[in-house]
Every structure is written in C-alpha cells, then in structure tokens.
Amino acid sequence: MRVVSIVQARMGSTRLPGKVMFDLAGRSVLSHVIERVRSCPLVDDIVVATTINPEDDVIAEEACRNGVASYRGSEENVLERYYEAAVKAGAEVIVRVTSDCPLLDPQVLTGMLNSFTGRKSDGESIDYLSNTLERTFPRGLDVEIFTYSALEKAHMEAKETFEREHVTPYMYNHPDIFRLRNYRSDTDLSEHRWTLDVEDDFTLIKEIYGSLFEEGEVFTTDDVVRLLRKRPELIQINTHVLQKKINYHVAFRVDASNLIGSGHVMRCLTLAHVLLLEGHHVTFISRKHPGHLSEIVHKAEIPVIQLEYRESESGRFQDNGYEEWLGTDWKTDALDTSQAIEEINSTGSPVDWLIIDHYGIDRRWEQMMRSLVDRIMVIDDLANRPHDCDLLLDQNLRYDHENIYRDLVPSHCRMLLGPRHALLRPEFKEARAKLKKRDGIIETVLIFFGGTDSSNETGKALEAVIELGADLRVDIVLGYSNPHAEDLQKRYGQRPGLRFHRHVSNMAQMMARSDLSIGACGTTTWERCYLGLPSIILVVAENQLEIARALDEAGAVINLGRCEKVDVELITRTLKSVLNNPDRLMEISVKSMALTGSNGSSVGSEVLLALRGE
C-alpha cells in the first residue's frame, strides 16, 4: 500500500496569521512538520496541500525547499483539495496532519500506521484510524489515517458546508458507513496543549525546541513529558488558552421593528441556520418592538429571549443617528442583554460568540459584554462608529473599505469586507449552480421592497408596470410587516399577469426565474447580485445611499435614487428603456454576479471559518 502524508497548510489564520512560516530554531514551523513526518519509515511520500491564494505562494516554495511536492486547490473546499492531492500522489492510504503541529511525534505516527496496516493485513476491515476520537494524546499530536476509498466516498457524498471545509467530519460522523477505530496512548496526556494556535502556544513550543532540538535528531513525546516534569512552569504558559470548540453557543443581539425593518433579523437567521446545521447552539436576544418578528425566529425552532419594549428615553446614542432603534438608552439595553446572557450562561451552555447586528450599538455597549462572552462579532453596514469586536462583517460594496474601518475596530479584529462575504441562504448557491445564462429578454419581473415597505414603493412599482402596458408576468412579494399588503391585494389582485406572494420560502427560485427586479437597496441586493438578476433599485433608507451609488458606478444596478424623488413616471420610463435594451441587462447581470465571486463558492464560508477560529 502506498502511504502518502498530506500536510494541510495555509498562511491565513484568525488567531495567528502566518504561523506555519514562523521561525522556529532556525527553520520554519512547516519545515519541522515535514521533517518529523519524513522521520516515519512507513510514509512513502509527503505532499503539502495549500490553497491557490497568492499569499500561499510561500507555502509552495517552502515545500519545494524541503524536497516535497505541493498541491494547490480550493481554500474553502478543503475536502476537494485533499482528494485531488491524493489522486495526484497515487495514494492508497492517506495520513492527515496539519502544519500547526511542530511537536508531531514520528513514533506515534509509526505506531498508528503499524496498527492501521496490521489490522488490514489481519483481515480486519478498517477505513479510518485517529488518535482524537477519544483524546488521550496531547493536542498537537493529532493524526488521522484513512483509505483512499474512504476519502473518495466522502468527497463524492459530503454535502454540508462544514463537511467540505474540513476533511474528515463526513467519515467520523458516519460510523454506519465507515469502520472507525481510535488509537490510545498508554498514558493519558490529554491535558497537555502542544498545538500552535496563539502566541502563547508559540512561546511554549519555542521553549521546548530550545531545550530539546538538535539538528539531525528527532525528540519524542517522552522527551517533552520529561522536560515538562523538570520545568512545570512551562505548562502554565498556555494553560489559559481556550481550545477551539467543535460546537459553540452563539447568541445574536438583533432587532426588527416597523422602524428598523426585517433585513437584520433575516440575515442573522441565514447565518443561524448554517450554524445549526453544523451542530452549534443558537439563541436570539431581541427587543419586543412593534413588528419584532420573534415569531419567525420561533418557527425556525430557535429560542428567543425577548427584552421588554420600552418607550425611548433620554441618554441614548446621540452621535450615529440610530438612537431610536434600541427603544431605550444604550446602557439600559446593555444591562438587559447582560441579564439575558447570564441567564443563558447559567444553563451550563455559556455563550461563546455574541453576534451583534444593530446600528444602535457601539463600543461602549460591547465593552459591557466582554466579561460575559468569549468573543464578539459585529455585522455592520455603516462604518460610522467604533466597535470592540474580534470579527467584523460588512458585506457592502465600498471603496477603500479597510481604511474606513481601520480606526473603528481593535488591531486584532479580523475584517470580512465586501459582497463576496454576503450572508446568503444555501438555496441561493443551489439556484446559482442551476442558473441558465440570462439573455436580457424580459418576460418575468419581480417586485420586492423588503419586509416593511412603509412608504409603499411596491404600489408605485406596480402602477409603473401597469402603465407600461407590456405583456409581462409580475411576481409581487409582500413582506411580513408590510402595512399596505391587504390594500394592494384588493386593488390589484384580479389583474391578469400579477401574482402576489406572502411569507415566501423560495426567494432564490423566484429570483432565478425572473428577468428583472424592482426593489430597495437593502439586504436582498446581494441575493439579486449573486444570481445575476438585473435590478432597478430605489434608496429607501439613508444608509443605502452610498451602497447604491457604488453599485451604480460598478454598472451592477440601475439606481433611481431616493425613493421620495422617484415617481411612477420615472419607473415607467426606465422600464421602457431596459425592455428595448437586452444588451444592457446582460451586462448588468454579468457585473452584478462578479461582485459576489465569479465561481459561486460556498456562501459566507469565510464567516464560518472565522467563527471557528480558522
């Protein structure tokens, strides 16, 4: 059997970027990992599997310097990268190690390979062997061994995002399909942390290498254990570091109301659904504003802690223009939220991540949460106030994005900026995969102005379509809190070609089959862009102005400007113009789709990687 060790490596890391190329005793961390794998006599070949990102050029170069091959593939679909690397290397048995384990023990690896191949030679069926199914080895000595056929089956059948962003979850989560075995240490060393994830981990590893490393020699687990017994103070260097968890408890602080609209809650629900699919725990914390949408969250079987609605009070934010959105002053809201989080923490499943999607919250509020949660993520669109967060997502199109936030977040904060990080439901990826090339011919028009549409832009767009007099099919989606819904259906419901929809769950399919959209420049903008749906947009809120202008300049939409300055006649003229200009619509389609990524890769996958600390 041809045994190939595939070493997973990339420069990107949430906690410690570039760690695999850190200098350790005169060589890179990656070089040490390669050398320690090479010291196992049962490994026939080594391949470093990295990404196609330019920043990972140094990984491929370092592999070459160390005399091993590299394979470059998808950053997000790591399972595919591993499979393709295994195919290219002609592997029959794959040894999976990661490049953040410079204390990997060749003796442990040799013992595991002997166990794996010995079981097979004795006639015992085995697909997967790991020393982490039941942890008895230190973190940092992790090894997984599996057959090529098991990897191929996982590659062909794994569908969930997290199964493809990691290599082996589909295997170890399906013991009904794969024959799994665990490899145990004679002594339980699971309390030790020898992996490289944060700066204090590197400090410990440097101390160990400084004491034990000699060029041409390979020290073992026993050597490290003896050193730590002699110098127990070394253990304290990184004992405080929290290991990245497999299952997190994520709390969302987000509101909907007649004033706020529904977009913030809906995009948080999108992220929440994916987290639930990965096995994480999710709780929403929302104030009971008029139009709060908590019933929608309940229907998704997500628990909601409702904060009592309070009439606006003095002492609210006076500097960002969204003070009314909290329904109370910021400090009272922070105290109410703290009480809710303490209630969650008391259940034995404390909050790991607090995700905030609220224009009325800034750094002062967030600092009050620091002692209650492990980490904080902010979803923002405004870039107008400071934050105390570890992760920030702004999915909007801006110029000079990073500079705008540079002085608004801590230096350690990871920023995910731009439409390619848009939070879109999985059905949009499915719809994009099946999407037919758009030809610019308009037969079906989609009208949707969000969950509320208090100014009745829907009615304005309907009048324009009717005045146009063209033979079109028109789908009108009325949001959960649209105050004009009943009147619109009564007035226009009997007209031929018009179809009204409420509470839709198939928006991706509706957008895919439409040829033109008329709507607001809200969160659905990125859904339309992702599916290349040409759009006529109206600005219905102040925070949409800059985004609408940027989209217009990029040639990705037709922007009519502020809704109060847009009348039926202007929409009608615009419709007449595009109806006779299919080339323009095809150009808009191509440019809008390009904003969210040219290949339709996993939606929001970098957000999930960041939440997992990868």
Image (cartoon, rainbow, N blue to C red):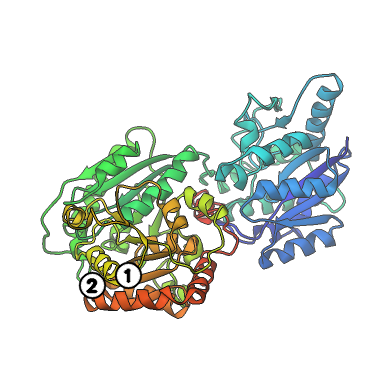
Q: Secondary structure at mark 1?
A: loop
Tell me the distance, in whole angstroms, between the alpha carbons under discs 2 and 1: 8 Å
Relative depth, front residue between 433 and 208: 433
Disc 2 residue type (three-letter):
Asp
Residue 398 image position (x, y, % from top left): 44, 74
Residue 31 against residue 410 in the figure, above or below: above
User: In the image, is 3 to the left or to the right of 10?
Assistant: right
Residue 415 seen in the figure: no
Which disc number belongs to residue 385? Answer: 1
Q: Are marks 2 and 1 in contact (CB under 8 Å)?
A: yes
Residue 226 image position (x, y, % from top left): 72, 37
Which disc number belongs to residue 159? Answer: none
Give the residue number, with chain letter if any, for mark 2.
319
Disc 1 residue type (three-letter):
Arg
Q: Quadrant of residue 218?
A: top right
Q: Quadrant of residue 21?
A: bottom right
Residue 387 image position (x, y, % from top left): 36, 64
Quadrant holding the N terminus: top right
Residue 240 against residue 476 in the figure, above or below: above
